[in-house]
Image: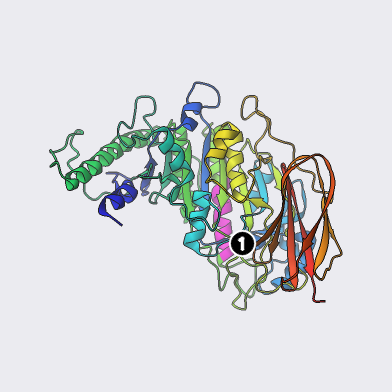
Amino acid sequence: MKRRDFLLNTLPAAAILPEVINGYSVKAFNSESPLVQALMRGTSLTDHVLVIIQLSGGNDGMNMVIPVADYSNYFNARSNIAIPSARVLSIAGVNGTGLHPSMTGLQTLFSEGKAKLIQAVGYPQPNFSHFRATDIWMSGSNSNQEVYSGWAGRYLNNEFPNFPSGYPSTDMPDPLAIQIGSTTTLTTQGPNVNMGMSITNPTNFYNLVNGTTDPVPNTPAGKELNFIRTVNQQTQKYATVIRGAANAVTTQLTYPTNNSLADQLKIVARLIAGGLKTRVYMVSFGGFDTHSVQVNATDTTTGTHATLLQRVSDAIKAFQDDLKFLQVENRVVGMTYSEFGRRIKSNSSTGTDHGSAAPMFVFGSNVEAGMLGTNPTIPGTATVNDNVPMQYDFRSVYATLLEKWFCLEKSVVDSLFPPNINTTLQSLPLIKAGACSGVTPPPPPVTSELLITNAPNPFVNNTDISFRTAGGHTLIQIMDTLGRLIKTMVDADYTPGTYKITFNGEGLPAGIYYARFQNGVTQQVRAMLKVRG
């Protein structure tokens, strides 16, 4: 990488804050966008905030959200780590699905109508590398696309090509997004420069005295030095407003101790209540790469994973209670995600290996509470290669929050994602009606009806797939147990009705395949068994 390219892509991640808040460094993303302009026009929508919680390492979603209705297959697949059915926590308004017994905090939020569970979120052709999978989630790309910019960075670069010159501005004096205790991510990387700015622990500054600097030579190195100083000056200005917001809040509720996620969320609540116009906050909590000793052999409800889940659940509950206490609860929606899930079958080391789809949680007083989707399909004889079949594409979750929480036009939302993505972005029922003026979230999908079937099942080479669409765009994808996209059978607009197509599986090995049906806000997954002739 050329030195200039290195500076453009990484230097905003190395700016320095001369003071930390509660022992945590802070990262500020500094640039305006049509998103913020739309939110800053004096309407009731101007103060919406999104808090993103990354569960780093690949969380085992099947022990986080237990498929009680299919408990026998669940237990058979992972008897050495399975949560006893009697210990599973119920979810208000949801039958046949429960939470890990350590997650009492989230259970309470469900009972208060402030949490939503989204089942089996992923993407076609999943990648099981921590780094690559994280990049996919941040860029919103297909797994086989090398996209070197983030969706927010591309958007901001299109609207503000002169960044970083001229910011912060009078119209937007605050950071657009803040990440606690981390460096800039791919999310804010534009085509030429990272649109974000990191603020970390104190080290050294380049001549930051009242915003003045020494002259620089008219050379390539001098231009690089000038760029560095510009970034540092911006960081110093943002440091002032961040400290001001933090100092404006003197009383908060008690948060759990020895819980780094709670520590981070406490700062987020403090900054939101302190008056920052920041729209996106990002925090992270690691340790979810549980290949071994995920549970204690003598009690599977305890152990490493149980401790992680309890800290996540307790931190989110404390955060939500604090937001209510600080009278900013209606402004905030939060979400959790992990770069991937784990396999259906546990391994012999009382752990789980890298998998594909996993559940997500969205929480807040404006969330349409309950569960979206169904329990994952679990084969009766699951093997080490079996993955949780995807129900929802993660990009549809992002798109829904942008459209229904940040109130963007659908065309603008679509522009935030790379071209030729192998999904159709859905508007999901995640946010209550009225969050955006004149925008009504779609009704929850009907999941009791069987919308896609196949016969014969099992089949040798060919099977007829029948599906019933309500009209509009309809998608049917065939995937294997590794989550790989085998074939797209349907990707077109249909009039309402029932249709039949034939899937030719000749040449494919015997085993389970999944037909994923998507129509508007509705999708179903059909397990199909190919056998030898």
Q: Position of residue 25 (x, y in %)?
A: 36, 48
Of residue 73 and residue 487, the one placed in the foreground of this image is 487
Span shown in magenta: 305-317
Residue 201 as seen in the image, left or right of residue 137: left
Main secondary structure along the magenta-highlighted residues = helix
- Residue in the picture at 48% in, 39% down: 280
Q: Is residue 494 magenta?
A: no
The C terminus, quarter of image:
bottom right
Q: Is residue 426 left or right of residue 279?
A: right
Residue 84 locus on image (x, y percent): 72, 66
Q: Which residue bears the numbered disc 1?
A: 356
Q: Residues within 10 Å of mark 1 (few under 14, many from 20)?
A: many
State the residue at coordinates (47%, 30%). Answer: 34
- For label 1, the SS is loop
Is residue 280 positioned above or below 464 on the image?
Answer: above
Q: Is residue 83 left or right of residue 262?
A: right
Looking at the picture, tell me which residue is in the foreground, 221 or 379.
221
421 or 403: which is nearer to us? 421
